Amino acid sequence: MKARLAASAALALGLALGASGCSMITYQATTEKYEPSDGVSADLGDLDLRNILVVSEDGEDGTLVMSVVNQGDRRATLGVQFGEGDVVEVAVPAGQTLVLGSDDEEPVVLEGIDAEVGGLIPLYFQYGDVEGVEKMVPVLDGRLPEYSDLAP
């Protein structure tokens, strides 16, 4: 009787481990952070920068496209440095999301970027006393319908 009970317990344990054991040792792809769109992302203190990209037809001037989520309770001024130290500033209201490249916002044009369309351009993001971050941002043209009217 004891042998039968022990065998049943061992079989149940073996089935439980066999059915769930692969999730204990298998690589979990859902834990990896990835960029779900054409642009790149960055976290900068209270600001979450999402889907950052530049749209340009000739590589000389480009329109900055991105979403900025201000998680803080104060207005933030985000500085974006490009080229030979040129800086544009973007005001982001407290607790709100600003979508550059939408019909609701004035376009932010980066003049003289001298970038190759289809390549990457380094942009440096910083606000307040938060340590800034440099990202290699894709430069796209207007071939895709969603970007067709965004080039300067």
Image (cartoon, helix red, strand yellow):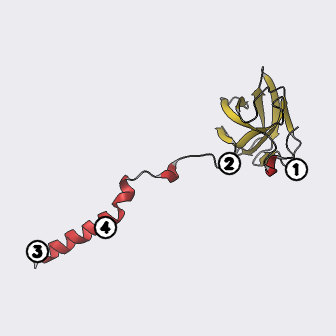
Asked if the residues shown at circle 2 and circle 4 are in contact, with their CB atoms under 8 angstroms apart, the answer is no
Q: 19 and 42: which one is in front?
A: 19
Please tell me which of labels 4 and 1 falls first in the chain.
4
Q: Which residue is mark 3?
A: 3
Q: Residue type at mark 4: give it.
A: Ala
Which of the two discs, 2 and 1, labels the residue nearer the N terminus? 2
Classify mark 4: helix, strand or loop: helix
Farthest-out residue, bottom: 1
**Quarter of the image holding residue 140?**
top right
Q: Residues within 10 Å of mark 2 (few under 14, many from 20)?
A: few
First in sequence, mark 3 or 4: give its number: 3
The quadrant in which residue 10 appears is bottom left
Which residue is at a point 67% across and 29% down the rendered structure image? 134
**Which residue occupies the foreground of this view, 70 or 50?**
50
Q: CA distance from mark 2 to mark 4?
A: 39 Å
Left or right placement of residue 135 versus residue 101 in this view? left
Observer-side mark, 3 or 2, equals 2
| C-alpha gap between disc 3 and disc 1 | 74 Å
